[in-house]
Image (cartoon, rainbow, N blue to C red):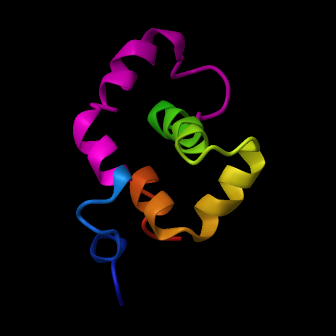
Amino acid sequence: MVETESLVPSNHLFRQVDAAVNFEKLHEIVEPLYSENKGQNSIDPAVLFKIVLLQHLDGSISLRGTLRRAQTDVAYRWFLRYRKR
């Protein structure tokens, strides 16, 4: 099996963005807005932010199109940390 890590070039734009931005900081920012005992589990806020960021980086006007591309594009999956499915 081939891992996505080896398929995304070291100089890829998404790797550069990933290295420059601390996406874990988003968890600290939104933590007060989430409840552990109310409602359903949420999608990771960093993933939600990254999806919109991908949409803008690629100049897409369709969020649904971005989500469809994330199903098949290795670089998208690497950036979103969706390595297995």
Is 20 situated left or right of 75 in this image?
left
Please say if 11 is above or below 85.
Answer: above
Q: Position of residue 17 (x, y in %)?
A: 33, 42
Q: Is residue 37 magenta?
A: yes
Q: Residue furthest bottom?
A: 1
Q: Is residue 23 left or right of residue 73?
A: left
Q: Residue lying furthest front in this view?
A: 59
**Quadrant of residue 9 within the rendered picture:** bottom left
Q: Is residue 25 visible?
A: yes
Residue beneath the point at 36% across and 52% down: 13
- Residue 9 vs 56, above or below: the answer is below
Q: Is residue 64 left or right of residue 45?
A: right
Residue 40 location (% of width, % of height): 66, 32
Whether 3 is drawn above or below 52: the answer is below
The answer to whether 31 appears left or right of 6 in the picture is right
* Location of residue 29 in the rendering, given as x and y in whole percent from the top left corner: 39, 14
Image point 50% across, 31% down: which residue?
A: 45
What is the count of numbered marks? 0
Quadrant of the snapshot with the N terminus: bottom left
Q: Is residue 43 visible?
A: no
> What residue sits 63% from the left and 20% below the top?
38
Magenta residues, as a range? 14-43
Q: What residue is rendered at 56% in x and 21% in y?
A: 37
- Between 50 and 32, which is closer to the camera in this rendering? 50
